[in-house]
Amino acid sequence: MPITPKQIPLASSREYGTHPVVPGYQFASDNAAGICPEAWHELEKANVDFAAGYGDDPWTGRATDLIRDVFEKDCDVFFAFNGTAANALALASLAQSYHSIICHELAHVETDECGAPEFFSNGTKLLPVGGAHGKLLPSSIDSMVTRRRDIHYPKPRVVSITQVTELSTAYSVSEIESIGEVCRQHRLALHMDGARFSNAVAALGVAPAEITWKAGVDVLCFGGTKNGMQAGEAIIFFDHSLSVDFAYRCKQAGQLASKMRFLSAPWVGMLSGGAWLEHAKRANAAAVRLEAGVRAIKEVEILGQRDGNALFVKLKPFVKQQLHAEGWRFYDFIGAGGSRLMCSWNTSDSAIDRFLVDLSKAATADPSGKHSSL
């Protein structure tokens, strides 16, 4: 008998949360969304009686070929369980322990991966840099490289950019090309954290190749989990020389799945019919609808620029409390302040409309709970 969501016990640890599954989680994170039909269907097909392990199965081979087709490049592809492992192992393969990695100060690799890049690289130092809209500037990279060249300073070796950024902005083709150029000038490798890469492609309306290897990106961590899969990120090396022995690194780090087909099969479902891009478009469109509704509520301030599927807003404490009381969940600690409202492939128009009604009621009430007469 298959396990249904209601039969799965909730975690009891405070660290992992005890909230029940409610519609309000539609804006907490795209991680809160379930598995999309295309990924689920292919996962079910892969659940055959027997298949070769450790990636020597038809689904892994097919997923790899599909990724090469999407990126128009003969690249090396590896699958990891999650984004932290994908980023950390990719960066560790590009840098030695005495090197440094230049990233934005709000980058996920800097703020939300518990030191994993440093751990797996045996101590490579992250050099965080500021920048508007969560983006690195070529001039900032150049400054970090040239500020010191003595042996006492960890030698810059890698630049890591996030696409889309933690502030829901997307690097344009020209912006990535400019970063790629300064990386070539200083002989730096360029890594892209693409946890929401699909949303960037959807927002920019460009081919994946145009904002990756053609623009100078050496390694991409292509996110699947946030786009509708149950787990699994693809680590894509556009330069074969950089992936030498990477399989051993994955094995040592516990990222070589014995039943690899259950990581790779959902990719087949997502890529073969274009669902990866359609779901990203849907998530972005939901954020557009949400943003339009929030703009109509004059008491709520929208923060920054939105290109992807997340909207940042400034909410008064009592407004947040009221929304939480109504069952809505969203994060306040991600990005440069404010509350993040994240849409996913499965965010419904009805949920957006219900949230906007509750937001309007809360925002137009005074702290005592009485509605304003304005």
Image (cartoon, rainbow, N blue to C red):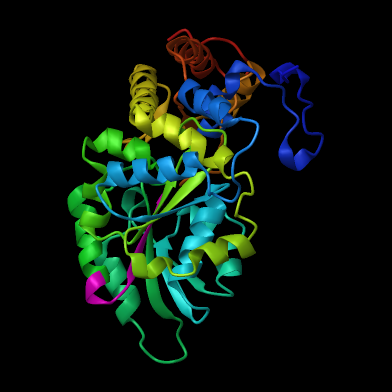
State the quadrant of the C terminus: top left
Which residue is at 59% across, 45% downward? 52
Relative image position of residue 182 (x, y in whole percent): 23, 69
Which residue is at 47% across, 7% downward? 373
Magenta range is: 184-194
From where the camera sits, is residue 106 visible?
yes
The verdict on residue 193 being magenta is yes
Horizontal side, residue 90 vs residue 112: left or right: left
**In the rendered image of this protein, does residue 296 appear above or below residue 234?**
above
**In the rendered image of this protein, does residue 366 appear above or below residue 350?**
below
Where residue 243 sits, quadrant-wise, is bottom left
Relative image position of residue 138 (x, y in whole percent): 25, 64
Which residue is at 45% across, 11% downward? 353
Q: Nearer the viewer, residue 91 or 125?
A: 91
Q: Nearer the viewer, residue 26 or 216?
A: 216
Q: Nearer the viewer, residue 101 or 290?
A: 101
Where residue 105 sits, quadrant-wise, is bottom left
The verdict on residue 121 being magenta is no
Residue at far bottom of view? 151
Q: Nearer the viewer, residue 132 or 307?
A: 307
Relative image position of residue 141 (x, y in whole percent): 31, 69
State the quadrant of the N terminus: top right
Relative image position of residue 178 (x, y in whole percent): 20, 61
From where the camera sits, is residue 33 visible?
no
Horizontal side, residue 296 vs residue 344: left or right: left
**How many numbered tags mark residues here?**
0
